[in-house]
Image (cartoon, rainbow, N blue to C red):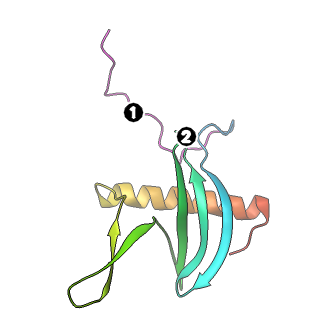
């Protein structure tokens, strides 16, 4: 029997009451510098673990960034090469909203601080 690849799993942000689809936040380390607020790890429902994620905040905007490799261009200016990216803005926004909700839940229940 051939697998049906048209079936889609529930998105990571669709946390069920039994907690099976929850992103787990760990290794929370507040670190304030410019927009950077904290470093943390996140375990996805699939079991994939991201380390050294960064929470940023600027006025009313918040976002999560992945680690990146620093390099300098020909003019000697710092640049950052991404290791992980999203195929489109919709996927990126869905990840951002889901991750921020997981962070908010972690801070609420674990008493962490930003």
Q: Which residues are magenta?
A: 1-16
User: Does dot 1 land on a helix, a strand or a loop?
Assistant: loop
Q: Give the image quarter of residue 3.
A: top left
Q: Give the image quarter of residue 104.
A: bottom right
Residue density around tag 1, few if under 14, some if 14–19, many if 20 or more, within 10 Å? few
Residue under circle 2? Answer: 47
Q: Is residue 18 above or below residue 98?
A: above
In what quadrant of the picture does the C terminus appear? bottom right
Q: Give the image quarter of residue 101.
A: bottom right
Task: Find the residue positioned furthest to the bottom.
Answer: 75
Of the numbered discs in the image, which one, if any, rests on residue 38? none
Residue under circle 1? Answer: 8
Say whether residue 6 is magenta.
yes
Task: Find the residue positioned furthest to the left.
Answer: 74
Q: How many marks?
A: 2
Residue density around tag 2, few if under 14, some if 14–19, many if 20 or more, within 10 Å? few
In what quadrant of the picture does the N terminus appear? top left
Q: Nearer the viewer, residue 46 or 75?
A: 75
Say whether residue 4 is magenta.
yes
Residue 15 location, x and y as percent? Answer: 60, 44
Disc 1 to disc 2, C-alpha distance? 18 Å
Residue 99 location, x and y as percent? Answer: 54, 58
- Residue 34 is left or right of residue 26, and the answer is left
User: Does dot 2 land on a helix, a strand or a loop?
Assistant: loop
- Residue 10 is left or right of residue 82, and the answer is right
Residue 106 location, x and y as percent? Answer: 70, 59
């Amino acid at each position: 029997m051939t697998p049906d690849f048209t079936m889609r799993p529930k998105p990571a942000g669709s946390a069920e009451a039994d907690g099976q689809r929850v992103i787990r936040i760990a290794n929370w380390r507040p670190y304030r510098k410019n927009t950077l607020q904290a470093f943390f790890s996140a375990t996805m429902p699939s079991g994939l673990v991201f380390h050294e994620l960064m929470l940023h905040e600027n006025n009313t905007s918040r976002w999560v960034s992945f680690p990146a490799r620093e390099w300098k261009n020909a003019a000697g200016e710092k640049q950052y090469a991404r290791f992980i990216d999203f195929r489109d803005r919709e996927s990126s926004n869905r990840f951002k909203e889901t991750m921020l909700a997981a962070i908010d839940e972690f801070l609420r229940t674990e008493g962490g601080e930003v």
